């Protein structure tokens, strides 16, 4: 299963405010909650174009099997922040290859 963990849900409010690229941004919780319920491993996957060729970057991110119900909320938020940090690094390395088709930071962002 692949889920875009930086795309907010069309309906519902399952998001958390996370620091991303120096601003607070709403990030979806769905991918992390689903991984926690399934007690599965999570990987990151980035596809970047360099020198006319596409490169896939697949990395182990976390194993959610140790997340317990009592600490799930904190574990989810921690994973979301770590993912946002990795996404920010990829954006810094390849700034023209991350696309948004909606108002990511909301109307108040500058």
Image (spheres, rainbow, N blue to C red):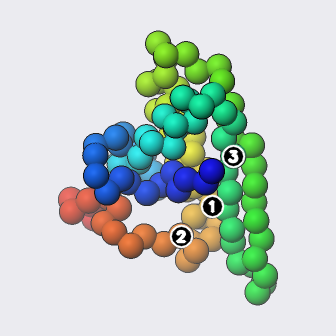
Q: Which residue is mark 1?
A: 90
Closest to the observer, 61 or 65 = 65
Residue 51 is situated, as x and y percent measured from the top left of the image, at 78, 84
Label 2: few (<14), some or many (≥20) within 10 Å? some
The answer to which of marks 2 and 3 sits earlier in the sequence is 3
Residue 71 is situated, as x and y percent measured from the top left of the image, at 49, 17
Q: Which residue is mark 2?
A: 98
Observer-side mark, 2 or 3, equals 3
Q: Is residue 99 above or below residue 60?
A: below
Residue appearing at x 74%, y 43% in the figure: 60
Q: Which residue is mark 3?
A: 43
The answer to which of marks 2 and 1 sits earlier in the sequence is 1
Q: Secondary structure at mark 2?
A: loop
Closest to the observer, 30 or 110 = 30
Q: Is residue 6 left or right of residue 103?
A: right
The answer to which of marks 3 and 1 sits earlier in the sequence is 3
Can the viewer see residue 81 in this picture?
A: no
Label 1: few (<14), some or many (≥20) within 10 Å? some
Residue 87 is situated, as x and y percent measured from the top left of the image, at 57, 55
Q: CA distance from mark 3 to mark 1?
A: 15 Å
User: Which residue is farthest left?
Assistant: 108
Q: Are marks 2 and 1 in contact (CB under 8 Å)?
A: yes
Q: Are marks 2 and 3 in contact (CB under 8 Å)?
A: no
Observer-side mark, 3 or 1, equals 3
Q: CA distance from mark 2 to mark 3?
A: 18 Å
Q: Secondary structure at mark 3?
A: strand
Query: Quadrant of the rendered structure where residue 104 is?
Result: bottom left
């Amino acid at each position: 299963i692949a889920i875009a963990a930086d795309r907010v849900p069309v309906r519902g409010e399952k998001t958390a405010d996370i620091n991303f690229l120096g601003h607070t941004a709403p990030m979806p919780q769905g991918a992390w909650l689903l991984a926690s319920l399934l007690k599965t491993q999570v990987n990151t996957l980035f596809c970047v174009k360099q020198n006319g060729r596409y490169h896939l970057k697949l990395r182990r991110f976390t194993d959610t099997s140790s997340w317990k119900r009592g600490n799930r909320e904190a574990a989810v938020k921690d994973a979301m922040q770590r993912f946002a940090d990795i996404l920010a690094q990829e954006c810094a390395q390849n700034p023209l290859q991350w696309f948004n088709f909606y108002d990511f930071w909301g109307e108040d962002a500058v």
